[in-house]
Image (cartoon, rainbow, N blue to C red):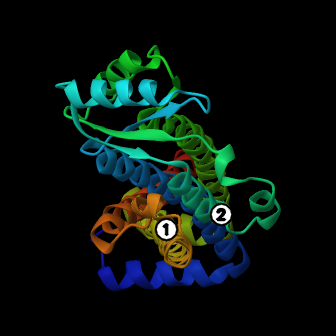
Amino acid sequence: MALRVDYIFKETGNNLVRNPSLTIATVLTVAVSLSLLGAALVIQRGVDGLNTRFKDDVEFIVWIKPDAASEQIEAVDRALADSPQVRDHRFVNTEETFTEFQDFWKDSPEVLAAVAPDQLPTSFRVVPVIPDLAVVQALGAEFEGLPGVRAVDYAGEYIKRLNDFTRVASNIMLGAALASAAASALLMYNSIRTALFARRREIEVMRLVGATNWFIRIPFMLEGMIQGVVGAGVSTLAVFGLNRVIRNLLNTTDFRLFESFALDSTELFPVAMTLLAAGALIGFVGSGVAVTRYLDA
């Protein structure tokens, strides 16, 4: 029996409106699962952007002991100036450190009131010639043992900790997304199976007059794919909304370090396409399995 496009779309539309509560539940379940997937993708892209940003400007800080003698500070300064691996360095005195401290804790007056400028350490801010994290850590280790040096902090360590944290968060979101996707496929399976059962007599008549399994199968599979794509569309809107919230937050706070987490349209487009493809796949698999099992029964 030849396929008719008008018949396919008519039957698909009838199937979608025949049980609206089940259709809405399926769409929302798909939307929730793909929203988690979208959030995980946004986080991963933000981390990649953050790593790229620091790739060519990795610096470390050489903290000086409060009781360090001026000769010791000058010795550290000369060692940095003489090192062929150091591109630039500058000394940060207690006043500059306190200014940074005030900017960081400006929303916590009780912390500011408890600290005086002379209680904060001085430091050297160092930019290496080779912006590789392993090289930077090896270079910083050369200055850790110098007299008057209290400690050396690396931007690379901060980025590594951030990567570890976001990797765990992304994995948790991906796990939740996979679990929700499985639930979405199962709900879609039950939705299509319910529709098939409600039309079992009509399907038997179609078989008697020569309808092939594919003629019967396509409207139901298209129904599942539409539900999946609509759910993906809702999740895409949710991801765009999340990105807008992140961008507004960055614009109204001093968290400029994390500006790579606010994606632009070119970066969001692949995420949206991934979500739509995943929604279509969930719909295709859930409805296809349901129809195939029914017709083979």
Q: Can you tell which mark lies on residue 29?
A: 2
Q: State the residue in front, 280 or 178.
A: 178
Say which amino acid is labelled 1: Ala
Tell me: residue 247, above or below residue 189.
Answer: below
For the question of whether residue 268 can be seen, the reply is: yes
Q: Secondary structure at mark 2?
A: helix
Residue 99 placement (x, y as % from top left): 56, 61
Tell me: residue 167, above or below residue 180.
Answer: above
Figure disc tally: 2
Q: Earlier in the sequence, mark 2 or mark 1?
A: 2
Residue 264 placement (x, y as % from top left): 34, 71
Q: Quadrant of the C terminus?
A: top right
- Dot 2 alpha-carbon crowd within 10 angstroms: few under 14, some 14 to 19, many 20 or more: many
State the image quarter where residue 269 is shown. bottom left
Q: State the residue in front, 103 or 44.
A: 103
Residue at 28% of width from left, 27% of height from top? 78
- Dot 1 alpha-carbon crowd within 10 angstroms: few under 14, some 14 to 19, many 20 or more: many
Left or right for 271, reference 108: left
Say which amino acid is labelled 2: Thr
For the question of whether residue 297 can be seen, the reply is: no
Find disc 1 in the rendering and name its residue: 232
Q: Secondary structure at mark 1?
A: helix
Left or right for 11, reference 26: left
Left or right for 268, reference 257: left
Residue at 76% of width from left, 64% of height from top? 108
Real-space CA distance between mark 2 and mark 1, rounded to the nearest whole angstrom = 10 Å
User: Mark 2 and 1 residues: CB-CB less than 8 Å, in contact?
Assistant: no
Q: Can you tell which mark lies on residue 139?
A: none
State the image quarter where residue 188 is shown. bottom right
Residue at 43% of width from left, 56% of height from top? 278
Residue at 60% of width from left, 44% of height from top? 169
Residue 19 placement (x, y as % from top left): 69, 78
